[in-house]
Image (spheres, coloured by chain):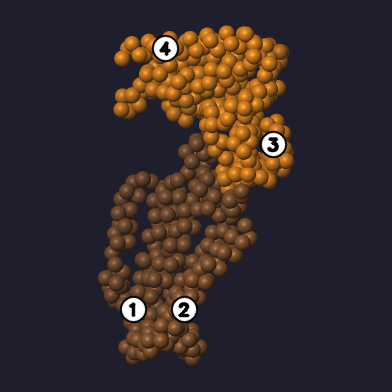
Amino acid sequence: MKADRYFSWLAPVTVGAIAVILWHALVKALEVPHYLVPSPALVVQTLFADWGLLFGSLLVTLKITFGAFFMAVLVGTVVAFLFVQSRWVEVSFFPYAVLLQVTPIVAIAPLIIIWVRNPTAALVVCATLVALFPIISNTTLGLRSVNPALIDLFRMNKASRWQTLVRLRIPSAAPYFFGGLRISSGLALIGAVVAEFVAGTGGTSAGLAYQILQAGFSINIPRLFAALFLITVTGVLLFLLMVLLSKLALGSWHESEVKQEA
Amino acid sequence: MSAVSLSAIEARVPVVEALSADKVYADGTRALNPVDLAIWPGEFVTLLGPSGCGKSTLLKMIANLIAPSDGRLLWWRHGFDGVGEAGKNLVMVFQDATLMPWSRVQANVRLPLDLQKINRDTANSRVAEALALVGLTGFERHYPRQLSGGMQMRASIARALVTEPNLLLMDEPFGALDEITRNRLDADLIQLWWKKKLTVIFVTHSIYEAVFLSTRVIVMAARPGRVLAEVTIDEPHPRTDAFRVTQKFAAYAKQLSEHLADASTRGATDL
């Protein structure tokens, strides 16, 4: 068991280390210029050298990401609850939720940026639209996926609508909801970066995407890589945070979180 | 009028009556021909038959989970809305244990009391009694997944008993369990029924289970679902596993399987 646990993080770390070493060796051996592919050492160096600039941008991107994620969870959950109140509501409105999902955000971002005056708010709205759908669809599915015999049991005990919601539907939906959170948190980050690209906002409230754009224009490829690295790390940390949340909420009972005992 | 004669009258009020109750689904499928049936206090009645004979449909009608297409049902001579006013309650044990996986055994069993907003301490002591009845004392803090299939079913029965029901409905409760576990639960159930003077309606497709448990067996057939025969199992209580190996047991089992075989051959010639 213990060896298994070590293996589960040692293996990917080893793969990562080998890849970085290989990358470094190839860049050195083939003498690739740093404006095409910088060596990993140079990327780390740039990360430290430009930390003030990059960290400020990271905070901006994080603000948009978390804002969008929070809005997506809030709006998505409310919409899901409305959907399960009646089939009629769901049938009428679900296609529009799908429409929202399949419309590329880059296509509607310019509109939103025109309509919403505050640039940060505009970016949050864009990223929210990207992150919203998994919350709606997963939570709706979860609220509907209740064991029918348990519904009968609640009916026979004359449970009120409220009691059935709180004691049965919400706990039944929890695993689906947390599944939705994992997908949505990553999408919020992607949405934030994409929206920043489209908006191309400069000045003080410039996020990591802006740094990538600028670095690209000025062929400052090491900085581009450093910014990219920060986005990736943020995404991974967000995912791990969602895994942790899910574990805390479902760890005691749900199959997905319970350790299989031999 | 004295209390004694009152309870004598009480005993003559059927727990459930089905008056020409039938079920035809919207697509025209006849799930159940009209049934006339009365269940009396203290009986252990089994609905026995193959799948598709309407035994679960009949049980769900008795549970008021589905409405009859025609005819009607009475509970203690009342409509279903009058059940609570008459101070009566009926509960159901399902095919699966249907425990809430996110709640511990104690909270699962306490659910009906929680829904009635009964004080937590009172409820917990009643839960402890119910768990003791089914032999699950000491498992209060376990989650359902930590229990075996048989123990989950015991918890489900405890949840039904915690409200001290006047009528206990059981829909093939032990169908998914292995035979050894099933026999043990049958034996415990019959003890419980005897000790607590319960009224039980039990659905099964097992002839042996029907003979072992019942005071009366309603034999049913499929296509269309209908009642074939009623057989009274005239064997004193409390019954033990010794009953299973008697000639009388075999004779009852033979009688029931002949009824079922008759119906299936007749059904076959109808085709």
Q: Colour of chain A?
A: brown
Whether residue B197 is visible here, answered yes or no, is no
Is disc 2 in the same subunit as disc 3?
no
Q: Nearer the viewer, residue A1 or A228?
A: A1
User: Residue B38, relative to residue B184: is it above or below?
Assistant: above
Identity, as a three-letter code, of the amino acid under mark 2: Val
Q: Position of residue A94 (x, y in %)?
A: 33, 53
Label ID, residue A20: 2
Give the chain letter for orange: B
**How many numbered badges does the structure rendering display?**
4
Q: Position of residue A16 (x, y in %)?
A: 48, 73
User: Residue B162, relative to residue B246: is it above or below?
Assistant: below
Q: CA distance from mark 3 to mark 1?
A: 62 Å
Considering the numbered disc 4 on the image, is that residue within a helix, a strand or a loop?
A: helix
Is disc 4 in the same subunit as disc 1?
no
Is disc 2 in the same subunit as disc 4?
no
User: Residue A211, relative to residue A78: is it above or below?
Assistant: below
Q: Nearer the viewer, residue A73 or B239?
A: B239
Tell which subunit mark 2 falls on: A
Q: Earlier in the sequence, mark 2 or mark 1?
A: 2
Is disc 4 in the same subunit as disc 3?
yes
Please give the residue where the numbered disc 4 appears in the rendered image: B263
Label ID, residue B136: 3
Considering the numbered disc 1 on the image, is that residue within a helix, a strand or a loop?
A: helix
Q: Which residue shows up at 54% across the image and 50% down it?
A: A255
Is disc 3 in the same subunit as disc 1?
no
Q: Earlier in the sequence, mark 4 or mark 3?
A: 3
Q: CA distance from mark 4 to mark 1?
A: 75 Å
Please give the residue where the numbered disc 1 appears in the rendered image: A197
Q: Which residue shows up at 38% across the image and 60% down it?
A: A133
Tell which subunit mark 3 falls on: B
